[in-house]
Image: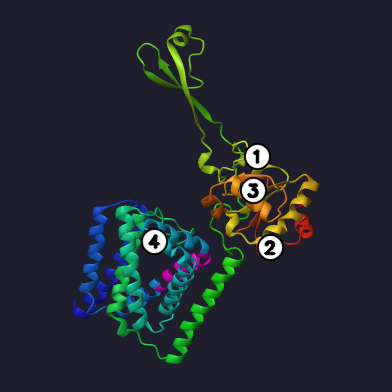
Amino acid sequence: MDKDKLIKMISWLYLAVVLFSAYLISYLPDYNRWFIIFLVFNFLLALAISSRTNNYVLIISRILIGLLFIYSGFVKGLDPLGFQYRIEDYFYAYNLAWALPSALFLSILLNAIEFSLGVLLLFNLRVKWVSIITLLVMFLFTATTLNDALNNPVPDCGCFGDALIISNWQTLYKNLVIDALVILIFLHRHSFENRRSLKFQNSSIILAFTVFVIFEIYSIMHQPIIDFRPWKEGTKLIPDNLKESQYYFTYKNTNSGELKEYLNTDLPWEDSIFMKNWTYVSTREQDPNVEQFKTFPLIDSNNVDISKEVVSSTSPSFLMVVTKMADANEKALKKFDAIYEACKNRGWNFYILSADVPEDLALYRKKYSLANYPVLNADDTSLKAAIRANPGLIVVKSAVVLKKYNYRDIPEPSVLINLFNK
């Protein structure tokens, strides 16, 4: 076998090994020493073939990285506020609270850069410089996710938004696999020729970046056009055909102090000796439906969670989500008075869902002259996940999310009520 054929074969072997590594990541959520050794082998192989790599392998590598960057940037750009919250998590983890005001700007900027780099790689535009920027970006991402994997400062880096959530170790593995291809592209950056004019290529960069930033701003001002979150429209929040919960009772032996737990159907109620020598300690409920529930606690004024009752009502429930009154749009808040009155006249449910403590909520209600809406308290993280708006409106009926509105998109009350008056 001549040398050229051997190099060609090794190049294709390298690409196959990298793609196989990417496939294995889905099966390795935790630290795996052998897989890390395997990834190191990828880098050594990349260096071994760096001087003479098959052109088709280089082209496929460039296209794959381009598509991956486009996908990653796009799914985060769908929901820039979601990626903002991830960036804020990092600021808190690294004691950089002073940088919090910049989180949304960084979200928009980083998403647009990632998407634009993907477009440029895919269409072979300014690859010489783009490969250098991509290598620097991946160095930053890899260093960050290495720390995430080792120290777990944040549970989820948000690399693919809410579209694909993977563990910190999987994120590191993913970045190492990407690095293996990015290094190859970087080493051969002079091999990617493009006969288009520099003016055309530079204009393409500006166009891709600008259009994507506009897209992100639209997503912020309205709702993501594709929703990957638990409360997306059409979602069934409570499953049908619920399985029966099981109750376990713990009893303590009055003589020995021994503790025993019994399933409620196995408890020897009628055994007089048992009842004499054992005293009740506690009850534990095991609900087999918990993982299927997509609700979160909604606490009323009596400190009772009524989330299931609210969302499962056969009449529409209008949920006015105000994560923090201090950050809400004042004019938008006053829109809800007419909606509340219309709901009250029809006997429909209307609630404020807020993370504010009752005392603060009462102050803001007085300040903005808001109607006396019934209030349910909820965790701010859950509210932000339910809808990316402050305030926003969610309409739920029979445990199904019918509609979600950013406050900018809420129709006039008469139109809104007619939509659900069926």
Which residue is identified by label 3?
362
**What is the number of the mark on residue 28?**
none
Which mark is first along the chain, 3 or 2? 2
| Front residue of this view, candidates 252 and 96 | 96
Which residue is identified by label 2?
331
Which residue is identified by label 4?
96
* Residue 422, image x, y percentages: 78, 51
Q: Is residue 407 above or below residue 249?
A: below
CA gap between label 2 and label 3 equals: 18 Å
In the image, taking residue 174 as reference, residue 228 lies left or right, namely right
Q: Residues within 10 Å of mark 3 (few under 14, many from 20)?
A: few
Is 198 within the magenta? no
In the image, taking residue 342 as reference, residue 119 lies left or right, namely left
**What is the number of the mark on residue 309?**
1
What amino acid type should be assigned to the residue bearing mark 3?
A: Ala
Q: Are marks 1 and 4 in contact (CB under 8 Å)?
A: no
